[in-house]
Amino acid sequence: MKASQFFISTLKEAPADAEIVSHKLMMRAGMIKKLGAGIYSYMPMGLRVIRKVEAIVREEMNRAGAVELSMPLVQPAELWQETGRWDKMGDEMLRLKDRHERDFALQPTSEEVVTDIARTEIRSYKQLPVNFYQIQIKFRDERRPRFGIMRGREFTMKDGYSFDKDMDGLRASYQNMFDAYVRVFTRFGLNFRAVAADNGAIGGSGSHEFHVIAETGEDAIVYCPTSDYAANMEAAEALAPAGERAAPAQPLVNTPTPGCAKCEAVAELLGIPLTHTVKSIVLAKEREGAAAEIWLLMLRGDHELNEIKASKIVGEYRFATEAEIVATFGTRPGYLGPIGVKGPVRVVADRTVAQMSDFVCGANQEDHHYTGVNWGRDLPEPEVADLRNVVKGDASPDGKGVVDICRGIEVGHVFMLGARYSEAMGATYLDENGKTAPMQMGCYGIGITRILGAAIEQNYDARGIIWPTAIAPFEVVICPVGYDRSEAVRAEADKLYAALRDAGVDVIMDDRGERPGAMFADWELIGVPHRVVVGDRGLKEGKVEYQGRRDTEATQVPLAEVLATVR
Ligand code: ATP
Ligand code: MG
Ligand code: MG
Ligand code: MG
């Protein structure tokens, strides 16, 4: 590929709505382009990464014996009514009507359609087991689309479905997929962890999530550093001893006051439940171990909705001590209003609510016009307890140590469904004795497009993205200095480009005629793992300059050794 024939569109600044590194860098590198909330075009540079992710997934699915098909994006309501999910899916499922007023859904997942295929195609035990998968667009009308394609509304998923004769078969299919997922995420070159996702309602561990470990992850993961135990917070909680178990989340006092347009609009705006309104507003997000995530809204002036609407969340801060808060804002928490911060600020506490309340208690400034917040004091006890779940240092359920908690991005999910869908939809087969039995199903998802964001959250620096080679848009970039001026540079760069291409290296040559500084900045932002600079000076000695994306300095490499260096 030559850069002059490709499409490169980099930005110096990320758009204001990009909150986390991966979203910012993907926008700046021209990988995705926003069309609407949670709806993005995959631009040529981003699509190359997506295709590489897909290729690895496809290869490992095929290796594991799964077979690819493709199911419709638009699915008739009748199928969804058969399983009761037409009603259950709620607002996350986008519905539409055709010209005959018939109801349809855009697929958020495809259990119904694949079960329909199985019930009409599979008659005999001889056709089992079978495992179908597709790599397809999904649409979920997420309440709070964010982080670019990490939580999009339209996104690409690999979804797979296994059909077995019995539970033993299902367990084998599940293990087979689990192993394939381990291979997939290992090949991506990411730091990941498979975690138990429920406490095994179907027998054994009926579900696992695969998480890419990252500070910005939306999920809390409980794991034991000295054993194999790892679970998501919900599964870990289910095993926590009674008494310490968190009460189910319940609305706090002053839940959006019914009819209060302000309150409801705030909840709507942020897409998370509004749990507390005094003059202050505390929005408690998910419960997550010791770290209660508290949303602190600071509003300028009065508690005016107009103000809120006009402002955005302008920053995220993590505090463990009051001193840190004072150092940052120059004032005590709870007295944050009049210090000139424009707009609400999201504060994430690294302590439990109880601990936080120790030093913010009593800071409710009821006479003041601004809106502040006081944590703890106005929170009734049960809710404080509700925010405490499994915490760091708790005994691990396997008795082999104590647990720690980290954050993860859910990139894959495997699930034993059993006969839930096959029974509801009559997906049966005839067994060896001519008897009718329901098929046992499993389902398996990978967030293809989410993986891009997750990979970047783990691999970036001040200059941009650092793609793992396996999923980089290009493996090598050749940057000729003076391609348009120097015969020697042009000839050697062309020769090197051809040689690398012939050797099967995914190489791009930057023949755009950009100045070296601009050219290097672009490729560092885009995150190509290997850069080879061809210039007159080096060529006199038969050398080029090589720099790996993580290297701090370039090294001189003889032309003949370039291939070996980038391999
Ligand atoms: P989440 O908990 O993040 O909402 P989920 O549990 O609803 O995800 P699944 O139904 O398990 O998602 O779907 C399989 C995979 O699809 C997930 O593991 C995730 O990687 C991906 N995925 C789910 N929702 C989205 C989304 N809105 N945008 C991008 N990828 C998604
Ligand atoms: Mg979801
Ligand atoms: Mg999930
Ligand atoms: Mg899931």
Image: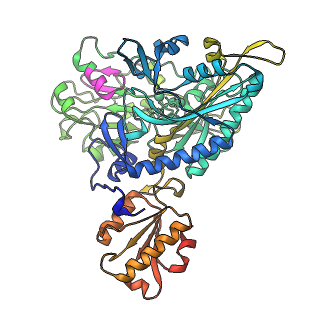
Instruction: Please determine whether, in this image, residue 388 is positioned above or below residue 59.
Output: above
**Residue sticking out furthest to the right:** 433
In this view, the residue in front, 45 or 520, is 45
Q: Nearer the viewer, residue 402 or 378?
A: 402
Describe residue 537's horizontal placement relative to residue 372 as left or right. Answer: right
Q: Residue at x 51, y 11 (%)?
A: 81
> How are the colours assigned in the image?
rainbow
Q: Is residue 547 above or below residue 335?
A: below
Residue 398 seen in this snapshot: no
* Percent coordinates x, y for residue 60 in the rendering: 63, 44
Q: Is residue 174 left or right of residue 294?
A: right
Q: Position of residue 535 (x, y in %)?
A: 38, 80
- Left or right of 61: which side holds 96? left
Picture quadrant where residue 230 is located:
top right
Residue numbers of the magenta segment: 265-282
Identified at 51% across, 19% down, the residue is 247
Q: Quadrant of the C terminus?
A: bottom right
Q: Check if residue 439 falls in the magenta segment.
A: no
Q: Is 494 or 391 nearer to us in this picture? A: 494
Tell me where residue 245 sits by quadrant.
top right
Q: Tell me, yes or no, if residue 416 can be seen here.
A: yes
